Image (cartoon, rainbow, N blue to C red):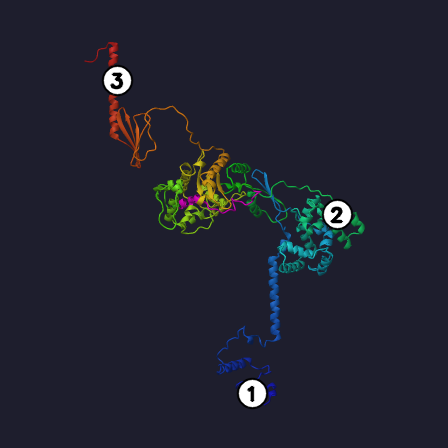
Amino acid sequence: MNVFDSFRKRDPHTMGTGPHRGYYSLDDRFDEADFYDEWEARQLGGEPRSEGLERPPTRWWRRSFWLGRRRRWWAARIVAAVLALLLLLVAWLAITAPLNKSLRPIAPPQITLLASNGTPIARNGAVTDEPVRVADLPPHVIEAFLAIEDRRFYSHWGIDPRGIARAAFTGTGGGSTITQQLAKFTFLTPERSLTRKAREALIAFWLEGWLTKDEILERYLSNAYFGDNVYGLRAASMHYFYRKPENLRPAQAAMLAGLLQAPSAYAPTRHYERAVRRMRLVVQAMVDAGYVTEAEARAMRPPDLDVRLKSDLPTGTYFADWALPQARALTETGYARQTLTTTLDARLQEIARRVTNRAPLGKAQVALVAMRRNGEVVAMIGGKDYATSPFNRATQARRQPGSTFKTFVYLAALREGWEPDDRIANTEITQGGYRPRNARGVYSDSLTLRQAFAQSSNVAAVRLLGEVGSENVIETAQDFGISAAMTKGDPSLALGTSTMTLLELTAAYAGVAANSFPVEPRGFVRPEASWWERLTDGTSSLSRSTHGEMLEMLRAAINDGTGRAAMLSQPNFGKTGTTQDNRDALFVGFAGDLVVGVWIGNDDNSPLPGGMSGGGLPARIWRDFMTQALGVSAAPTRQPPRSQPDPGGPVEPLDLPDGADIPLGDGESRLRIRDGEAVLSTAIDGVPIDVRVDGEGVSIDEQAIEDARRRAEDRQLELERQYEEAWRQREGVPGPD
């Protein structure tokens, strides 16, 4: 048998099952499975596999998987891969370059914010107007833009190599087509890279495939930037010439078309001569393109400007910067300008500005937030001067709240069943890794929760955190809307070491004031909620007793504690806060319908001069704001010393400790203090009476009262007898036998 025998066709009925000789058959009836079974057996040094066993599939990463594949197999898979790639590309374009995005303004339209009384306070955003329609524009308007930007716009497919070459050699016309420019400022960032240029070309083809040429040109003209914060041809023609684009003259259209290359550099309101030179370049391009004749070009004179829309409103304030994102969310996407009324109260804002400006701050910064109990912000100060520093320290600065956070430690305790009269140790902490100290190093054996809160005892707050559990304190703070990071098991949490904004802290106090939490700060009035919305709004409230106890403690912090400087002539509630090394000083409280937070500190987080605390200047700023905002007066202060006549009598000290014996004004009464009780000793008709006041109430010696009553009756009878005897003697009436 020679080598050619392997090419001869054999009868399938005579094909044996003997060992394979290693030759490859060209017979279509050749059984590949049998061949590979025998081949594997030889390679492994064993026998061919049995017919009942399945041959394991060849793995795709092995070379044998790819060898021997037919062209049809390869062609089918290549076509499938190309189709899959195209589908992925279309999906990517549909997501990153949705066609409806080119129908929206590329810059947020202008919004004017009003105070609650209608006074304009700020205007922010781009000057935009309704889109233009190519069919309504005069030919010379369209031709001016095509001549300088894209002469072959109506003949290319989004990319114009000839236009790129012409721009490179002549310097006129843009290297990018109008379609590419629309793709760039609508869908892409202004970065300069080959990747962005490739994406720009892909999106340009995408736009050309789905939009007509007139639609592309309309969207381009309606969104292009023309300088002076003006976007779109209609807004630009009204801004510079106070004329609708349908009525533009050739020279005016040429000047507007020339602005697109460098809008800020060519804006005629600031650089009129540059704009004129650029306009002449556009006119020459129109001549070169055959749109106008040389004579018509020479007849075009630089147009006069007619700028009527001017704004003397600031583009931003501390409140406006914070409220603007909310305003954008409330308005519909479109080109129309919007005017929205905010919750800002112009009178209260002026009061806030006045009281913070006259405060002796030195180099320190100040922030103030005033809101209603429902979260409507009515005044906001984010710093001493917005023009110098627009950074909003009320909404952006995250600082430690200090002891103002203790409100939520004590609230957690009240929710767990503690009462204001329960006592807690106030001794110095001498063990453990964290050893906070009380202000001025003042300690005692124990205090009631009411006293500890009023005096802002640090050691008591840390111990209370340990008793209640940091988890419950964190849960309480989060219930009231505090989102700051708080570490479980950290004892310093009780002293307000977690950073948060003043706005967030004040809103949490608003939840305490309203007994409805959490409270979301907002700059716009919300529509009245339906009964279903009120039922499902997710707010919570404290029990009446718990809420009353918390208000009692907040009241005590002002009347009897560290917040005395904030006292008003009407009920008010609040808490002072001072962080470590006096880096931050705060006072947050409420009275009437207003909840106000005040913060003072340095931007570099350095200590405040003079050891400033929350009970000092922040409390006085809070009081000054509230007295003017609510029309009330501050609580009367103690009268200064004044000269009085000497009342005589012995000098008695009045600051005696337990066991003191204090004489009272009538000379017969004394007040003695012994063993936690007060005893008032006096005399009635010569009968000594003791009135005791202790933890069990008021008690009086009943026997002494009875003796006094008898003596009074006997004295009355004696007086009557003496009166009768005197009458008988005067009238000469004999007495009884």
In front: label 1 or label 3 = 3
The amino acid at mark 2 is Ala
Q: Position of residue 402 (x, y in %)?
A: 44, 44
Which residue in the rendered view is the most extreme toward the front? 610
Which residue in the rendered view is the most extreme toward the left? 737
In front: label 2 or label 3 = 2
Residue at disc 2, secondary structure: helix
Relative vertical location of residue 16 with respect to residue 699 in this rendering, above or below: below
**Residue 717 appears in view:** yes
Residue at disc 3, secondary structure: helix
Q: Which of the image's four quarters has the N terminus?
A: bottom right
In the picture of the structure, the residue carrying the numbered disc 3 is 720
In the picture of the structure, the residue carrying the numbered disc 2 is 251
Which residue is drawn at the image coordinates 77% and 53% (left, top)? 287
In the picture of the structure, the residue carrying the numbered disc 1 is 14
The amino acid at mark 3 is Glu
Residue at disc 1, secondary structure: helix
Relative vertical location of residue 416 with respect to residue 689 in this rendering, above or below: below
Bounds of the magenta segment:
386-412
N-terminal of the pair, mark 1 or mark 2, is 1
